[in-house]
Amino acid sequence: MTVGMTVRTRIAPSPTGFLHLGTARTALYSWAYARHHGGQFVLRIEDTDVARSTQASVQQILDAMRWLGLDYDEGPVYQMQRLARYHAVVESMLAAGTAYRCWSTPEELETLREAQRARGEKTRYDGRWRPAPGKVLPPVPAGVAPVVRFANPPDGLVRWDDLVKGPIAVGNEEIDDLVILRADGVPTYNFAVVVDDWDMAITHVFRGDEHINNTPWQINIFRALGAPLPRFGHCPVILGDDGQKLSKRRGAVSVTAYEEAGYLPEAMLNYLARLGWSHGDDELFSPAQMVQWFDGSHLSRSPAQWDPAKLAWVNAHHMKQAPDARLAALAQQQLRRRGLPVDDLELLARAAALFKDRCSTVAELADWVAMIFEPVQPRDEDLAAHVGAALRPALQDLRERLAEVDWVPQAIAAAIKAVLAAHGLKMPQLAPALRVLVCGRTQTPSIDAVLALFPRATVRSRLPAS
Ligand code: GLU
């Protein structure tokens, strides 16, 4: 990094769907890199695909960024609000001869491509409208609105030192004169992205490696504009657990789906960070630690594989660290979504304290809480194994005693002890029966603490009456 330079990064999602996990990861890298260097992070909405961009998608992107806590210093900047700027830059390029108008019709270009394919050549624009000294251009056809093309340098190499992949060189003869302004006056991605990265003084671009083929064009356009080049880092794709590229058809790929499934944003960031970056052997860390560590090194060149089990493990760790009051509020949202409104946040916090060590997600915490409010359905085999007829008198006795005791764990524990003594039983005989009948499960934390979470009447109603 150049001394004295302010690091400025951006994430530039297209609002044509939800925020993908891959985009969330590059957003995280861009954010962490800016924060690490005390720089700025910008959110830009690349909405030039007018037919596919939607306001709902913009909202999803904003929600996902907020949920993840990836705060931006500028934006959202919308490309469609910057058309006048792109037009001005196009005019300056036309004047400078680094761009030219092209009147080729789609049909004409298709014929050209067919001929190239027939000759076994790579399909590319042949430069028929590109001005050159002494060249006679075709007559301008009537009724055809022209596009504007970039006059790509005809030869030489485009080189850059990729932050992820290292040095890359592409020959200019590989790439053609791409359209920068469509006939309807809307710029194409490769052009708008350059004008924006230039205007926003972006110094470092992290993005998915599906864009690596675009970068030579972009570098050439930066050069044609006399604009300073950012550093580029192209992160490898994220593969699904089946080894295929993550896609809508292969499992959930939207960030907000993970919020709904009960994952914590800091766990998501932790997990996403490790999909393509490492800091020694550290697997579990906070966003603040990542900011401290993320200096753009140790980015992986090979594709990472999405591993739901590891994400659950990371989330479980962050659940343990999370304050009970926060988990209570999140569990409340989960329960509300299930049509189970629970107003008692104090109860939810006690439940969080008791169960969070056993939960991979807030959804699992909500499952625990749901047993308090909804009837439980013990499995037949659990009833057969743990609730034998011989226990019935003891369970009836406990039901009676629980009518009287203070409704706190100590008093409930004392009542259970008294029942054990009176019936000559041991805790490992009675506790499983209580768990199965009251909680519908065979495993719970300390049964007295668990019972104290329930209303007294609920516990008693789940035990056999005499
Ligand atoms: N709109 C592009 C995308 O969502 C941005 C690519 C870039 O970061 O340059 O893939």
Image (cartoon, rainbow, N blue to C red):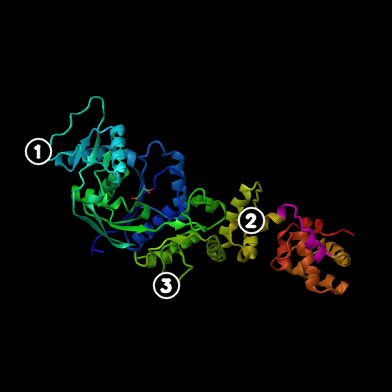
Identity of the residue furthest to the top in this view: 142
Residue picked out by circle 1: 134
Query: Judging from the image, what secondary structure is the residue with disc 3 in?
Result: loop
Measured Cα–Cα span from mark 1 to mark 2: 76 Å
Q: Quadrant of residue 149?
A: top left
Query: Quick one: 283 or 434, which is closer to the camera?
Result: 283
What residue is shown with label 2?
366
Badge 3: residue crowd in 10 Å (few <14, some 14–19, many ≥20): few
What range of the chain is rendered magenta?
372-387
Which element carries disc 2, helix, strand or loop? Answer: helix
- The answer to whether residue 460 is seen in the rendering is yes
User: Could you tell me how far apart the alpha carbons at marks 3 and 2 are, in whole angstroms?
Assistant: 35 Å
Q: Residues within 10 Å of mark 1 (few under 14, many from 20)?
A: few
Above or below, 63 against 396 in this view is: above
Q: Position of residue 7 (x, y in %)?
A: 29, 59
Mark 1 and mark 2 in contact? Answer it, CB < 8 Å: no
> Residue at 40% across / 63% down in the picture?
302
**Which quadrant is home to the C terminus?**
bottom right
Amino acid, disc 2: Ala
Q: Is residue 267 or residue 302 the one in the foreground? A: 302
Give residue 64's position: percent from left, percent from top: 46, 50
Amino acid residing under circle 1: Gly
The residue indicated by pointer 3 is: 280
